[in-house]
Image: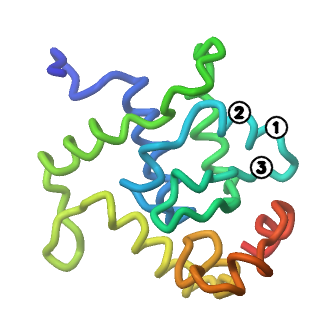
Amino acid sequence: MKLKNAEFTARQRQNYKALVLFGAYTGQRPYATIRKLTVGQFRRALQRDPPVLDVLAQQDKIRMQHYVQLHPCVVEAVTPLLEGRNRKDDTRIFAHEYFNKWARTKKIPLMHGEHFVCGDLRKFAEQRGDIIQWDQSNKNYIMTHGVSGVDWRFYKHPLSDSVYDVA
């Protein structure tokens, strides 16, 4: 989509901002998860106190349903995306394909000579988690890292409140 006098619309800019914040704060996989999330999932997540998104098994690479906490800045960025969506709960919330194409075309430089790709959001979450001393078990659960064993499948399945509180 080519726009005159602007690279993209205000709505697209808001969508891209929300996508980046969500990816950076949660570490979800861009292709397996982020691009599949729906308006309805975020509506339900924002109705919870605290706000926690329920990622479905079919939206995760290893097919594990799990909760993802929503940081206040993610809530603030996502809320405008829900406005005017008139009950289209099954539509995808993020314009991931357009964002990915835009980011690859722009070749946004990173500090170490590489260019930004969507997978960098997951790397950022992992690195930031180490800096803030994010509880390792909680981080692994939210990012579905090394959680395919029997322990995680049948015994370790935290409730939404505990996922939010430990993150």
Render colour scheme: rainbow
Q: Is residue 8 left or right of residue 154?
A: left
Quadrant housing residue 114: bottom left
Q: Which secondary structure lies at badge 1?
A: helix
At label 2, the amino acid type is: Arg
Residue at (56, 73) in percent of width and height: 144
Please say if 121 is above or below 144: above
Mark pair 1, 2: CA separation:
6 Å
Label 1 neighbour load within 10 Å: few <14, some 14-19, many 20+: few
The kind of secondary structure element at disc 2 is helix
What secondary structure is marked by label 3?
loop
Q: Nearer the viewer, residue 166 or 57?
A: 57
- Res 43 label: 2
Tag count? 3
Which numbered dot is residue 51?
A: 3
Q: Which mark is residue 47?
A: 1
Q: Amino acid at mark 1?
A: Gln
Q: Are marks 1 and 2 in contact (CB under 8 Å)?
A: yes
Identity of the amino acid at label 3? Answer: Pro
